[in-house]
Image (cartoon, rainbow, N blue to C red):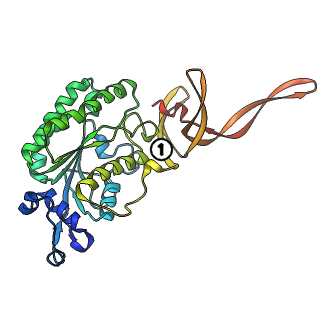
């Protein structure tokens, strides 16, 4: 997709500085981060849209979402509302709209991404890399420490090829598979340290680990609501770097109602089928038992029609009957995918 232009009238002075510094096109801005652009001189200026490469696996591709847009479309819209125009770049394309390029490769480990990375970076010349990787390494049996070492090397590889690019490195989303979830937590604890050890002001840590549970369509991939959370997390990190501001849309973490699609297994005539259930979920107060103690907690619940048994006396005998009632329930076996 061709580069687009954003007039200075749509950008604050601070954002203009951020755009220049982020792309490495202004020596003055690099020399003096506090420099300002005079309004009179800036009125006629235009800026090439930031070239952004989303880099990762099937989560970056968009598996689990309804249109395979991943977090990308939502993020681009938020940034544009905040005054920052981007142009996604990469050898892959999926999702809705016209700006759908990326480097999301389903099933790929960090090792496989590394093998092709130099060519992608040379071809696409990104100003920004959004890196979310390691899920498949953990799935395939790599330990969290080995995976963190590979992530560190991948970051170095990006830096060597693109010395002035900004790299946003994510703590990965939380898988539902128990072993992967545990290893993912350890892996995520290692990422802040390895980022800090780079001592690189152009690398920013982004925490995506809060995306999990019923934010996922299956064991590893977000549903549309989960991807909206990812977009928000990327946006918050980028807004601090580029100075975007204004009303860029609702914070999904403050939502009290959400439409979620969850995959599940259904057994029909002895055969297992994978199905998807899409429902409206609400954040409600519920009573749960924790370690034998009943507690009141806030939980995501959905209203379902369920069968309830009851007994009535007929001709002097108790007879079991059932009726359909509406009941607030949790995900239940929907998490068993």
Q: Secondary structure at mark 1?
A: strand
| Residue 215 location (% of width, % of height) | 43, 41
| Residue 37 location (% of width, % of height) | 16, 70
- Mark 1 residue crowding within 10 angstroms, few (<14) / some (14–19) / many (20+): many
Instruction: Please indicate whether residue 36 sits to the left or right of residue 228 in the image.
Output: left
Q: Quadrant of the N terminus?
A: bottom left
So how many labels did they put on this image?
A: 1
Q: Is residue 109 visible?
A: no
Camera-nearest residue between 6 and 312: 6
| Residue 61 location (% of width, % of height) | 29, 46
Residue positioned 90% across, 28% down in the render? 314
Residue positioned 21% across, 54% down in the render? 52
Instruction: Please indicate whether residue 9 sits to the left or right of residue 63 in the image.
Output: left
Q: Is residue 19 visible?
A: yes
Instruction: Please indicate whether residue 335 sits to the left or right of residue 175 in the image.
Output: right
Image height of 163 relative to 51, above or below:
above
The residue wearing badge 1 is: 261
């Amino acid at each position: 997709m061709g580069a687009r232009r954003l007039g200075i009238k749509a950008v604050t002075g601070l954002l203009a500085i951020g755009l220049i510094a982020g792309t490495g096109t202004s020596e003055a801005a690099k020399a003096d981060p506090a420099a300002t652009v005079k309004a009179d001189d800036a009125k006629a200026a235009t800026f090439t849209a930031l070239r952004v490469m989303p880099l990762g696996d099937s989560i970056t591709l968009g598996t689990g979402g309804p249109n395979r847009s991943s977090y990308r479309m939502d993020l681009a819209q938020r940034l544009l509302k905040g005054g920052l125009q981007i142009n996604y770049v990469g050898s892959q394309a999926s999702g809705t709209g016209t700006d759908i390029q990326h480097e999301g490769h389903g099933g790929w480990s960090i090792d496989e991404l590394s093998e092709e990375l130099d060519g992608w970076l040379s071809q696409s010349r990104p100003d920004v890399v959004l890196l979310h990787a390691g899920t498949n390494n953990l799935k395939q049996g790599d330990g969290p420490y080995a995976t963190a070492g590979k992530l560190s090397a991948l970051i170095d590889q990006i830096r060597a090829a693109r010395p002035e690019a900004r790299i946003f490195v994510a703590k990965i989303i939380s898988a539902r598979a128990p072993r992967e979830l545990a290893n993912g937590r350890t892996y995520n604890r290692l990422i802040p340290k390895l980022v800090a050890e780079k001592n690189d002001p152009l690398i920013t840590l982004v925490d995506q680990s809060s995306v999990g549970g019923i934010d996922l369509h299956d064991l590893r991939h977000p549903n549309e609501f989960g991807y909206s959370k990812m977009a928000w997390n990327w946006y918050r990190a980028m807004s601090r770097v580029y100075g975007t501001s204004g009303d860029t849309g609702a914070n999904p973490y403050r939502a009290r109602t959400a439409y979620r699609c969850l995959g599940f297994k259904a057994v029909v005539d002895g055969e297992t089928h994978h199905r998807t259930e899409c429902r409206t979920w609400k954040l409600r107060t519920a009573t749960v038992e924790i370690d034998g103690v009943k507690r009141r907690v806030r939980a995501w619940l959905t209203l379902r029609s369920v069968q309830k048994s009851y007994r009535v006396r007929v001709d002097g005998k108790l007879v079991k009957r059932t009726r359909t009632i509406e009941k607030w329930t949790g995900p239940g076996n929907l998490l068993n995918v």
